[in-house]
């Protein structure tokens, strides 16, 4: 099986489209997979290839301020981070609609991502019932909890945030999966998180899973730090294969 990797520009969004070469112009289940903070789309290409080998059309976009869209990180703590996530949320529908208009998407739409991309995934679930399944790797489903963690970290480092920081980031309340999950349609949802994660706390995912006991949620943990290994990529791929079969 030969996998085609195409560089595309959809609007102002640079991305890699990864799909079996013989299926370039055929309908395929679609997965949009997001990279992490201060990385780029090429660093999730191995995951994209694994998913494409399983029959999916995979889109790997560069987030705002990253990759081909690289900009300096603001000296205001977390401004660039939240801005990058929010831009991913803004751009999701544009990407889906583009490939639908090209008649290249069947009824399955999956989302996934690593770290910041995992947080993007959780946010998208709060507003897009058309998403069939989602995989969050090393990301937090609690935007509010992570904002609180950032505020504490900034204070401990002797830095400062705007006095109206919570108002400036008030949009995240509507995208906090921890809060709104009970009101959402249940879809296959996969979490992977390392217990020793030094960047995004394992506890935020564990608390979500404990609070929302649901057979649609699959949670895998490991004695790992903030790192994705090949085994995890295979687990993500297997999850989407099963989710697509169950549709």
Image: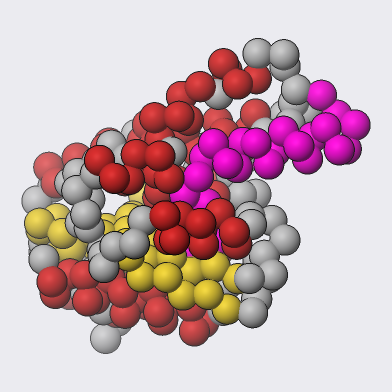
Residue 203, horizontal then vertical, whole percent: 59, 59
Residue 39 visible (yes or no): no
Q: Is residue 155 magenta?
A: yes
Which of the two residues, 73 or 206, is positioned nearer the viewer here?
206
Q: Seen from this angle, which residue lies furthest right? A: 158
Which of the two residues, 190 or 45, is positioned nearer the viewer here?
190
Q: Indicate left or right for 96 with 225 as reference.
A: left
> Quarter holding the C terminus?
bottom left
- In this view, 27 is above or below 236: above
Residue 156, horizontal then vertical, whole percent: 86, 38
Tell me which residue sits at (61%, 49%) in the image: 37
Residue 75, horizontal then vertical, whole percent: 78, 28
Tell me which residue sits at (34%, 62%) in the image: 213
Which of the two residues, 5 or 43, is positioned nearer the viewer here?
43
Here the colouring is: secondary structure
Which of the two residues, 246 or 57, is positioned nearer the viewer here?
246
Q: Is residue 13 magenta?
A: no
- In this view, 170 is above or below 119: above
Magenta residues, as a range? 137-160
Residue 27 visible (yes or no): yes
Residue 199, horizontal then vertical, whole percent: 69, 56
Tell me which residue sits at (16%, 59%) in the image: 108
- In this view, 133 is above or below 146: below
Tell how many labels: 0
> Quarter holding the N terminus?
bottom left
Tell me which residue sits at (56%, 54%) in the image: 204
């Amino acid at each position: 099986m030969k996998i085609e990797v195409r560089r595309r520009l959809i609007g102002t969004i640079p991305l890699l489209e990864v799909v079996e070469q013989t299926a370039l112009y055929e309908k395929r289940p679609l997965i949009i997979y997001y990279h992490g903070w201060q990385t780029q789309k090429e660093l999730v290409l191995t995951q994209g290839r694994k998913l494409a080998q399983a029959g999916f059309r995979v889109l790997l976009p560069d987030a705002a301020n990253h990759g081909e869209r690289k900009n300096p990180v603001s000296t205001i703590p977390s401004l660039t981070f939240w801005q990058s996530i929010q831009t991913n949320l803004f751009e999701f529908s544009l990407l889906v609609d583009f490939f639908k208009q090209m008649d290249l998407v069947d009824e399955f739409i999956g989302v996934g991502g690593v770290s910041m991309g995992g947080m993007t995934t959780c946010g998208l679930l709060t507003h897009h019932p058309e998403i069939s399944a989602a995989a969050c790797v090393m990301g937090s489903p609690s935007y509010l909890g992570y904002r609180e963690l950032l505020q504490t970290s900034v204070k401990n480092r002797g830095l400062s945030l705007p006095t109206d920081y919570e108002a400036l980031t008030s949009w995240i309340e509507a995208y906090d999966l921890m809060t709104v999950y009970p009101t959402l349609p249940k879809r296959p949802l996969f979490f992977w998180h390392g217990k020793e994660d030094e960047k995004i706390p394992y506890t935020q995912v564990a608390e979500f899973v404990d609070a929302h006991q649901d057979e649609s949620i699959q949670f895998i943990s490991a004695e790992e730090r903030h790192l994705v290994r090949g085994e995890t990529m295979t687990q993500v791929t297997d999850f989407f294969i099963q989710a697509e079969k169950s549709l």
